[in-house]
Image: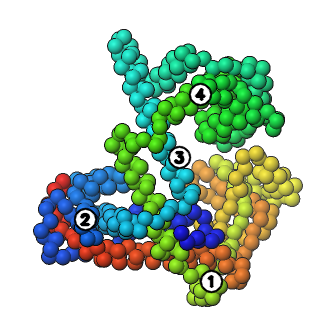
């Protein structure tokens, strides 16, 4: 497969999705389409292979977009249909060409299949647990309660063998992490929970527990911790809590082993999810081969793009600021007067930059041209305001740093030029390539069925 240098893989996916998720090509029409049944809105054909788009397909795609199928306007119906035809055309093309996926896409697909299999195994275990409880007259259905009971029952049948000394050592390392306080803000809480326990490198391969003949190491525990959503991580204070975390990981590992991700999914929805993911990776492979790899990115091409409108690449005026809001004009005047002294400005600047969760206040001429111009005029440690925002809010701004707009020569702007050129040209070429594919497959649109009275509308 052709390689696209210097371009993150995620950008390739976004470029393909930008076309496949919207901005479809113009629908073609043909008198032959009148022979299609009313339930079929469009059709593509490659020899004996036929791909159709039905009313049900359009309704399902509309729901995925958050639209109400029964209230689609004609324009919305045509847009959804056009996107589905793009996908059907790629399906026909890939059925013949069988392009290899990128290695990272293959790995992502395997991980996705394993996750689906795990979810199915977990759902099945939940169903068994709920049925057993219902037979006993137990009405508890909360997933957390059921999950803990399922885990405990399984580990009671096959108890892990623990290294209690190592568990105690790890418990001390986790307990030493900063604990969120009740009055912590979201950023402060996340910062604390993002911490990792201090574990010696030589301890990472030590075995904490053995279950079902398999060891669970310190490295496995740290991997579980890393994989958790930061804000969902508990603060572990003692050995019991560390064991609870490991017990859950052991049970999930057992379910993953039982899931046998290589088998065909039993649930129809899982089959569709896997098919959709596979088609997405196949579409990306096709787009890389036939579109993205063909976009020129040499210096002469990029220089021509830059020279078309050099001012487009100018660096905008920008400023780093600290804002303060006060309820009265008098209070805002006092704040501004204090900040106009060098000591006051230095004090607020130092305080702002010392905040552990500080996010710099950056503005530029594209986001707020008037305030940016005033900040540039005031200069570093200058004061802008007080400004009345409404009846009960006055703003005072301390400028920490400010730079005026300036032209950017090609050598400095090249990366930005290349990104913008590649994105725009790739999208244009991909749209044209998909339109050509659809024409080559004799696109037929059933205009009679597309009328306002089409089934389901």
Residue 12 at x, y = what percent? 53, 66
How far, Cα to Cα, is label 3 from label 4?
19 Å
In this rendering, would 172 be left or right of 433? right
Give the number of the mark in front: 1 or 4: 4
Q: Nearer the viewer, residue 215 or 143?
A: 215
Q: Which residue is disc 1 drawn over?
A: 298
Which quadrant holds the C terminus? bottom left
Q: Which residue is disc 3 drawn over?
A: 111
How far, Cα to Cα, is label 3 from label 1?
37 Å
The residue shown at (40%, 29%) is 124
Question: What label sits on residue 198 in the rendered view?
Answer: none
Q: Dots 2 and 3: beta carbons under 8 Å?
A: no
Instruction: Decide: few, some or many residues near mark 3? Use Cα within 10 Å; few <14, some 14-19, many ≥20.
Output: few
- Determine the residue located farthest toward the top in the rendered image: 136
When the figure is inspected, residue 348 is found, relative to residue 149, above or below; the finding is: below
Of marks 2 and 4, which one's residue comes earlier in the chain?
Answer: 2
Residue 446 at x, y = what percent? 18, 68
Instruction: Decide: few, some or many residues near mark 4? Use Cα within 10 Å; few <14, some 14-19, many ≥20.
Output: many
Mark 1 lies on a secondary structure that is: loop
How far, Cα to Cα, is label 2 from label 4?
48 Å
Question: What label sits on residue 50 in the rendered view?
Answer: 2
How far, Cα to Cα, is label 1 from label 2?
41 Å
Q: Dots 1 and 2: beta carbons under 8 Å?
A: no
How far, Cα to Cα, is label 2 from label 3?
31 Å
The residue shown at (43%, 65%) is 98
Q: Nearer the viewer, residue 233 or 225?
A: 225
> Count the marks: how many?
4
Of marks 1 and 2, which one's residue comes earlier in the chain?
Answer: 2
Q: Nearer the viewer, residue 8 or 308?
A: 8
The residue shown at (61%, 77%) is 418
Residue 211 at x, y = what percent? 62, 24
């Amino acid at each position: 497969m052709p390689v696209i240098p210097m371009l993150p893989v995620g950008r390739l996916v976004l470029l393909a999705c930008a076309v496949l998720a919207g901005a479809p090509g113009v629908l073609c029409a043909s008198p032959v389409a009148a022979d299609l049944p009313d339930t079929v809105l469009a059709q593509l054909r490659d020899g004996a292979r036929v791909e159709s788009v039905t009313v049900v397909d359009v309704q399902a795609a509309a729901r995925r977009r958050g639209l109400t199928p029964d209230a689609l306007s004609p324009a919305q119906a045509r847009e959804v249909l056009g996107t589905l035809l793009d996908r059907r055309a790629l399906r026909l093309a890939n059925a013949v060409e069988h392009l290899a996926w990128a290695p990272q896409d293959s790995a992502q697909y395997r991980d996705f299949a394993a996750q689906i299999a795990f979810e199915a195994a977990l759902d099945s275990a939940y169903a068994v647990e709920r049925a057993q409880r219902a037979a006993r007259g137990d009405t508890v259905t909360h997933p957390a309660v059921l999950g803990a009971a399922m885990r405990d029952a399984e580990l009671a049948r096959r108890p892990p063998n623990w290294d209690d000394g190592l568990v105690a050592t790890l418990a001390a390392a986790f307990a030493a992490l900063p604990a969120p306080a009740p009055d912590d803000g979201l950023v402060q809480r996340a910062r604390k929970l993002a911490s990792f326990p201090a574990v010696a490198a030589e301890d990472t391969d030590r075995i904490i527990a053995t279950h079902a003949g398999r060891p669970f190491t310190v490295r496995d525990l740290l991997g579980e911790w890393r994989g958790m959503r930061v804000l969902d991580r508990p603060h572990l204070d003692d050995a019991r809590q560390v064991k609870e975390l490991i017990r859950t990981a052991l049970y999930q590992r057992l379910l993953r082993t039982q899931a046998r991700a290589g088998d065909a999914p039993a649930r129809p929805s899982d089959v569709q999810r896997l098919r959709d993911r596979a088609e997405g990776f196949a579409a990306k492979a096709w787009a890389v081969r036939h579109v993205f790899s063909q976009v020129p990115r040499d210096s002469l091409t990029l220089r021509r793009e830059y020279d078309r409108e050099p001012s487009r690449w100018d660096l905008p005026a920008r400023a780093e600021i600290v804002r303060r809001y006060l309820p009265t004009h008098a209070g805002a005047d006092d704040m501004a007067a204090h900040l106009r002294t060098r000591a006051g400005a230095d004090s607020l600047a130092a305080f702002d930059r010392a905040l552990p969760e500080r996010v710099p206040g950056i503005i530029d001429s594209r986001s707020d041209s008037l305030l940016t111009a005033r900040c540039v005029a005031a200069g570093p440690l200058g004061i802008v305001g007080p400004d009345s925002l409404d009846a009960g809010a006055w703003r005072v701004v301390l400028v920490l740093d400010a730079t005026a707009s300036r032209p950017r020569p090609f050598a400095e702007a090249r990366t930005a030029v290349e990104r913008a050129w590649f994105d725009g040209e790739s999208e244009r070429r991909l749209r044209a390539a998909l339109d050509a594919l659809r024409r080559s497959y004799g696109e037929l649109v059933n205009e009679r069925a597309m009328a306002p009275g089409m089934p389901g509308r």
